[in-house]
Image: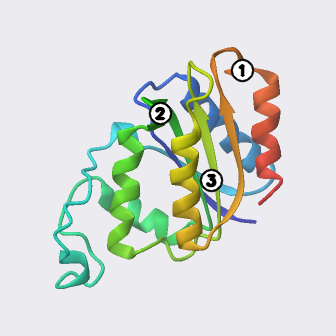
Amino acid sequence: MSNILILQGSPRANGNTAWMAEEYKKAAEAAGHKVTLVNVAKKKINGCLACEYCHTKGNGQCIQKDDMQELYPLLAEAEVLVLASPIYYFTLSVQIQAPIQRFYSMMKPANVKKTALLLSSHSPNVYDAAIAGYKLISGFCGYEDTGIVTAMLDEQKTDATRQKIANLVKNI
């Protein structure tokens, strides 16, 4: 069974994105996987400073000492990385973009082999930029994309979306 890390990037604790992340966690645990779910929106994580400390003096360690320090060990153990984000103005939330930027210090989480993406929005036709960014990151890192689930207003917190999420878990 796989070690799964879900990074949930919505500040709304009981919102649609949080629900999607929790449903993924439930389905993965029911399938026997070890799952850690982190609400990165509640963490103090800054974006990359582009200072290059990590690749010069830091030996892969970021100079910033914020809540990202809690994620680095989890990223080191994860075999599957799930990103869950609301769409804010056509892209991933800044709360999830900051930790993704900070992957730079390690270049990529080394043990991750597979990824998935969960997106929520109140509007149709707003997912393209977020999905393109996710695919670029997954491709650059050489990860296998196990799937993407989007849920706009009338699809949120439904049995149909729950089933789509459960089907992603089958791709691990």
Tell me the element at label 1: helix
Give residue 87's position: percent from left, percent from top: 49, 32
User: Residue at image x 19%, y 62%?
Assistant: 64
Q: Which residue is at the far top?
A: 154
For image coordinates 32% across by 57% down, the residue present is 68
- Kindly report the distance in space between the C-alpha atoms of the residues bearing marks 1 and 3: 25 Å
Foreground disc of the pair 1, 2:
2
Residue 90: mark in rendering: 2
Amino acid under label 1? Glu
Determine whether the residue tagged by mark 2 lies in a helix, strand or loop.
loop
Q: CA distance from mark 1 to mark 2?
A: 18 Å
Residue drawn where x is 38% and y is 38% of the image: 41
Quarter of the picture containing the N terminus is bottom right
Query: Which quarter of the rendering shows the C terminus?
Result: bottom right
Q: Within 10 Å of the Cα at label 3, are there few (<14), some (14-19), or many (20+) other Cα atoms?
A: many
Q: Secondary structure at mark 3?
A: strand
- Tell me if residue 81 comes above or below residue 143 in the rendering: above
Residue hosting label 1: 155
